[in-house]
Every structure is written in structure tokens, then in C-alpha cells.
Amino acid sequence: MTEGRRMAMIYRLLVVNSFVWASTGLYMPFIGAYYTQQGITPLQVGVLVSIGPVISILIQPLWAYMSDRSGRHRLVLIIVSLGSGAAILSYLVRVSFGAFVVATVLVSIFNTAIQPLNDALVTNRAAKLDANFAHLRMGGTIGFAVTALIMGNFLKSRAGMIFVLGSAGYFLLAALFLLLPEDQQMTGRSREQEPGPNAKRIFKNRQIYLVLFLAFIIQLGLSFNGTFYPVYVISLGYGQSIVGLSSFVSAMSEIPILLCANRLIRRFGAVNLLIFSVLMMAVRLLFAGSGMLTLMLMSQLLQGVTYMTCYYSCVMFISENVVEGKTSQGQSRLAMVQAGMGAVMGNILGGLMTDYLGVRLSFVVMSVCVLMAACLNVGLISLFNRRKKGGMVFNSTPNI
């Protein structure tokens, strides 16, 4: 491949990856506030936002398996994008809790698969093109940030438009995936035909379980914050413009992390970065629940050292430690833990707490829970490493 063709393909990856996140920014930051404006209670909001994670656990692995087994990663991404664009319009049929439940189920069947399948495709292509995945992911951060900021000002009196624009965004995303070639990789069917103990394995080693556990703790706080921060903003009398500004600030805080992500992982190790992210998550929740707009916006600045350090460390660790031909399934396991189990716990517990304790106190309680989980995990890692005495070292990092 010539240098010109290589750079053209890298730019295509950048455009597609940017729009994957921009399409999410068209509606996701505002849906919690939309529910509140329609009279949905905090507990019901928690239930609604938890439907997607449950569907992610049940359905999303099937999309990943289909993608790996067929080797048609791009085609599966086009299907789930088109399905998401059609399904999201079901939110406009009727305004009620029951109708929102049905709409959320329909959307989640498709859209929960987009991010892990896209990550699998983009990381594979980036590795083959010798491109920096962090730079490609930066396009997604900027796309999300700019979209959320514009939408926050646009939606002041047009709350229902998030679903119309979200639908258009998903249809356009499906068209953009046509810019990419199919990812030529050993299919799951070929892998199953190979003899040996690795035929049914997804990961090369068991270190992944610690990584996924840390990701779960972080996602617990992230999901609670993502769902109830907009609810808290609206309850304090601020509008959708503040929600959009907060999403812009949080997304832009990811850029410094992405600029030096590979160096951070090489120097500190993926697990150390994840532990640091958990500690910062506890601080972020305290700031978000303060009720002071300045501190609340500062909490959004911690997005880079809570979400992005976790996301990037996990995605790159998985891409380096997954069995060949099972990249989509490997990334789907991360999505099951983060967008699935962690999000379900964060949203359901958050809904229960906010109903009984109020939003502000619930942020404090969740912060304490995340901090305690972090301390427990650090103790377990230290105990394990002392007992191993030169065995598997959890702070080892993949070659990036």
C-alpha cells in the first residue's frame, strides 16, 4: 500500500470514528433531562437508563459473535446503525413511562453493539496501518463535544428533536461505514476448525479479569453521574444549555489524556491508571453533587482522568490480549462489564438512592462506595502480588 493510500484510509477511519461519537452526542447527554421534563421520577429514570445495559449483556454478545464468525464486521455495523436509526423514532409515538420502556428496548437491541464493534474494527485497521488509535479516538471526543454543545443551545424549546436528529445521525453513520473496507481477519469459523485448547478461548491470559473488575467499579460511578447529573442540573433550575456545556467540557477534557495515552500506559501500567481513575471518580462525584455550578463544571473536567484513562487502557489491553479472530467478542466483554453490569448497578442503585435520599446526598454516598471499592481492590492486588512473589505481575502492560 502506498503512503498516499495509507493516509487516505487513516483519514477515513478518523471521520467514521468521529461520527460514531457525534451521533451519540445528538441525544444521549440530554435523554435523562428529557425524561425529567416529561414527569418521569428519578427511580423510573434509573430503570429506563438501565434497560440499555441489560440488553447489552443479553443481545450485544450475539452481534459480536456474528461479526467475528462471519468476518463481515463492516456489514454488521451497518445493520445495527440502520436498526438504531429506525428504532429511536419509537420514542415519539407516545409520552409515558411504558412507552419509553418499549422504545428503549428497541433502540438498545441495536445501538449497544455499535461502540464495541467499531472499536474492534478501528483498532484492527489502525494496527495494520501503523496509526495511533489515540489520535483516531480524539476525533470521536471532539465530535461528541461539539455536537453536545450545539445541541444544548438548540434544544432549549425543542426537547423532542433529539430523537429525530439521533435517527438522522444513525442513518448517516451507516452510510459512512461504507467508506471502510471489510476487515480481513481470521473468522470465528476458521478458529473453531483449529485444534488445541485455544479454540474456545477469547483472551490469552487471566489478567483481563482484574482489568474488567476495575472497569466495573469506574463504570458504577460514571453511569450514576451520567444519568443523574443532568437530572440534578434541571432540578437546580438550569436548562439544557448547561447540560450541553457540561458535556462539552467533559469531552474536551479527554483530549490531553489522548495526546499522551500511550506514554502514560507505558510508564505507569494499565492497572495503575485504572486504580487512579477510580480514585478520581470518587472526587468527581463529590464535586458533581455539591450543588455549586462551578464545582459541578469542574467535576466534568475530570472526565479525562476517569472515563478516558479507563476506556483507553481497557480497549488497548484487550486488543493486545485477545485471541486472533475474536476481536469483536473481546471488546464486547468490556462493553458487557461497562455498558452492561456497571451501568445497571449504577443506574438502579442511583434511582433507589435518589428516591430515598435525594440527588445531592446520593452523589456523596456513591462517592464513598466507589472509594471503598477502590481501597479494597488495591488491598487485594497487593496481597496477590505478595503471594505470587515473582509470578504474574498485574502492572505489566501490553506492547502499544
Image: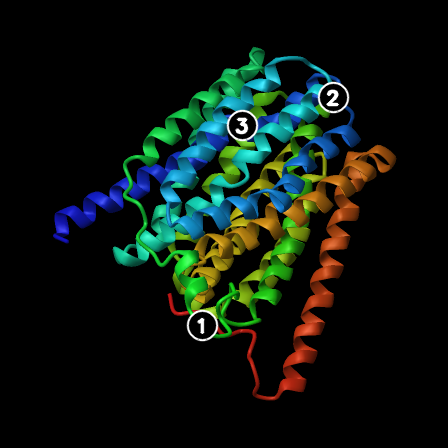
Displayed quadrant of residue 75 = top left
Determine the secondary structure under disc 3.
helix
Q: Earlier in the sequence, mark 3 or mark 1?
A: 1
Residue 33: percent from left, percent from top: 65, 24
* Residue at which label 3 appears: 244
Q: Which residue is drawn at 67% across and 49% down?
A: 341
Residue 186: which quarter of the image? bottom left
Q: What element carries label 2?
A: helix
Residue 240, which numbered label?
none
Please state which amino acid type lies under the numbered disc 3.
Gly
Residue 229 in the image: x percent, y percent? 66, 34
At label 2, the amino acid type is Phe
Q: Which of 218 and 340 is in front in this view?
A: 340
Which residue sits at x=34%, y=36%?
A: 177
The number of numbered discs placed on residues in the rendered structure image is 3
Q: Residues within 10 Å of mark 1 (few under 14, many from 20)?
A: few
**Separation (CA) of disc 2 from disc 1:** 51 Å
